[in-house]
Image (cartoon, rainbow, N blue to C red):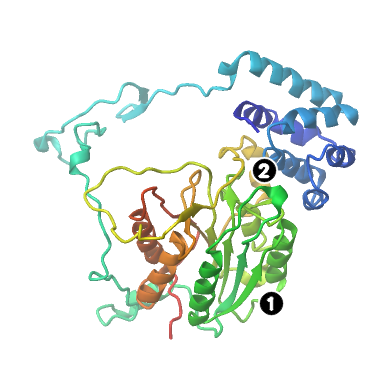
Amino acid sequence: MDEADRQLLRRCRLRLVGDLQVTPLWDALLKRELFTPDMIDDIQAGSRRDQARQLITDLETRGRQALPLFICCLEETGQDTLASLLRTSRQVTKRDPEAIRPLDLEPAVVGPMGLKPEKPRVMKPDPSNLAPGNVTPVVLGPEELLPAQLRPEVLRPEAPRPVDIGSEGLGGQEKLRSAHLVYVLDADPCGHCLIINNVNFCPASELGTRTGSNIDCEKMRRRFCQLHFHVTVRGDLTAKEMLQALAELARQDHQALDCCVVIILSHGCQASHLQFPGAVYGTDGCPVSVERIVNIFNGTSCPSLGGKPKLFFIQACGGEQKDHGFEVACMSPDDEGPGSSPEADAVPFQGDLEPLDQPDAVSSLPTPSDILVSYSTFPGFVSWRNTERGSWYIETLDSILEHWASSEDLQYLLLRVANAVSEKGIYKQIPGCFNFLRKKLFFKTK
């Protein structure tokens, strides 16, 4: 779907969610092949508003002709008011592309009297005036941030930063306070680890074989077995089968366990979201949003995991952009060896990143708690995979866990992963995460 149609859908989203009659639409959507039967089955969960909301969200991923075909479906089912609204708005937008441009916003500088729109300026405070109660606001400009002063900081194995909760230097109250900020992983096994490894995709999906993904899968299977997880591997699942496998895991009794891990290796794309960006493909070419995956394990669907860490590691593209990076003082020399052939977990389409239905939709989603989602790449960019050694992200994650999991918490481990991956290759990649954990997490290594 092109940007103009996507923005139009989002401007009309509240009206569509409020008025759309979804039941008459299913046959029309199937007849025009806008959705598959499995996709419609997935949408038909919850109330009418829930179904309408999910239908509008998924419509953005159904190609360039999705909006005009959807308008035809509305007309066929007698929903002429909504059809006219979309058709008229679309014609206006085609005539006046400026209508979809965001407003230009002026920067605001916080001053003593409140917010005043004005041009940012460089202010160099006089040290003699920095007495308490006499602080001048400072806006950093180009003179304070010179590129020549920036240097890459590399995390080296020679400089570990282990965290020892039981250090003798801590007093009794300090030890107790620190212990309360660390998840307990005493169970054996610690929890379940599900790995979904999609390698071979149907020809109609136009998604290539993910050569090298089996190497990633075996690395993660071995690593999380060593970290005392019960590991299950599922390969080449369609979107519906992925959701079924995840739901089966969520339905299990986790009462005696301390953690849950989901690892997904597949092609990916951008997708509309409220909390967690991105989507991963089933082997049938249908996307499953990361947000939907995560919410399968919320407190309502999986009460036995309440208050326990739920970790998601996503090796997939976040979009189509290739990051050329910028020149720095040093580069990693061992990422372009002879015979190496990096591939992108590429995508045929993208979704936007800022839905306009937040007031309507936020209340229907659970507040994320005890959740961490680690992405192989920044949203909007490709994620690189070597056909002989596996993906940059998984290879690095496995190595960091091997060397540092016994002494460092998960958040610091992921900083090491991001730093190491960012130094690889000609095209660049930077992993990142959405962290809603309430405590530090140390894996069980002994």
The picture quadrant where one finds residue 337 is bottom left
Kindly tell me whether residue 133 is visible in this rendering. Answer: no
Q: Amino acid at mark 2?
A: Ala
The picture quadrant where one finds residue 181 is bottom left
Numbered-mark total = 2
- Helix, strand, or loop for circle 1? loop
User: Relative to 325, is 287 on the left or the right?
Assistant: right
Q: Which label sits on residue 386?
A: none
> Which residue occupies 75% across, 41% down?
55
The local crowd at label 1, few if under 14, some if 14 to 19, many if 20 or more residues have their Cα within 10 Å, is: few
> Which residue occupies 63% across, 73% down?
233
Reading the image, the residue beneath label 2 is 361
Picture coordinates of residue 370, whole percent (x, y):
54, 64
Picture coordinates of residue 414, whole percent (x, y):
41, 62
> Which residue occupies 58% across, 37% down?
352
Quick one: quadrant of the N terminus? top right
The extreme front residue here reads 339
The picture quadrant where one finds residue 128 is top left
- Judging depth in this view, the residue of 156 and 342 nearest the camera is 342
Picture coordinates of residue 349, whole percent (x, y):
61, 40
| Contact? badges 2 and 1 (CB < 8 Å) | no
Kindly tell me whether residue 402 is visible in this rendering. Answer: yes
Judge whether 210 appears above or below 96 on screen: below
Quick one: quadrant of the C terminus? bottom left
Judge whether 254 appears above or below 57 on screen: below
Picture coordinates of residue 366, whole percent (x, y):
64, 54
Spatial CA span between label 2 and label 1: 30 Å
Q: Amino acid at mark 1?
A: Asp
- Judging depth in this view, the residue of 176 and 414 nearest the camera is 414
Reading the image, the residue beneath label 1 is 253
The local crowd at label 2, few if under 14, some if 14 to 19, many if 20 or more residues have their Cα within 10 Å, is: some
